[in-house]
Image (spheres, rainbow, N blue to C red):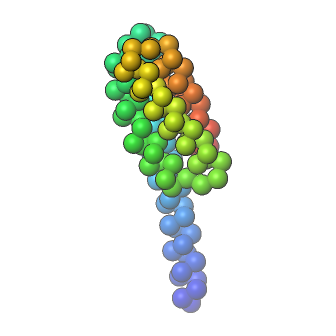
Amino acid sequence: MNKIITLAISTLLFAATGAFAEEHAATALEHANQAVVHGKAGHASVLVEHAEAALPHAKKGEEVAKGEAKTHLSAGVKSLESAIEHGKLGHTDMATKAAEEAVEHIKAGNK
């Protein structure tokens, strides 16, 4: 009986971890998409705001993700960091490209 209960609890925790990663990745994706929109409009400072808002969610998702999802979320984090760096320097085109890369990685990591 104890083994069944332990197995059930483990299964629920594993499922909750996946949901936790998906929730954070979804929030990161929303902000990363907004970063791209504002980057394409030439608003580097607003791109930075959204990339900075996406970053902690992408990092949280990365912490709990596994396998290929973790690899993509890690790449998404690096792309967001690059977008922030370039955006702060006023390199809107490079920041937008990095934000676009982040979007693609976060999408791939949230399948």
Q: Which of 22 and 58 lies nearest the eye of the viewer? A: 58
Is 87 drawn above or below residue 4 in the view shown?
A: above
Is 92 drawn above or below residue 69 in the view shown?
A: above
**Position of the C terminus by quadrant:** top right
- In the figure, residue 85 lies in which quadrant? top left
- Can residue 72 be spotted in the picture? yes
- In the figure, residue 43 lies in which quadrant? top left
Counting labels gives: 0
Q: Residue 14: image x %, image y %?
A: 54, 64
Is 2 drawn above or below residue 17 in the view shown?
A: below
**Position of the N terminus by quadrant:** bottom right
Question: Relative to 90, is 29 on the left or the right?
Answer: right
Q: Which residue is drawn at 57% across and 27% down?
A: 101
Question: Relative to 97, is 53 on the left or the right?
Answer: left
Q: Which of 98 and 3 lies nearest the eye of the viewer? A: 98
Q: Which of 54 and 20 lies nearest the eye of the viewer? A: 54
Q: Residue 68: image x %, image y %?
A: 65, 48
Q: Residue at x 51, y 48 (%)?
A: 62
Q: Residue at x 54, y 20 (%)?
A: 97
Question: Relative to 75, is 83 on the left or the right?
Answer: left
Q: Residue 94: image x %, image y %?
A: 51, 17
Q: Residue 24: image x %, image y %?
A: 45, 45
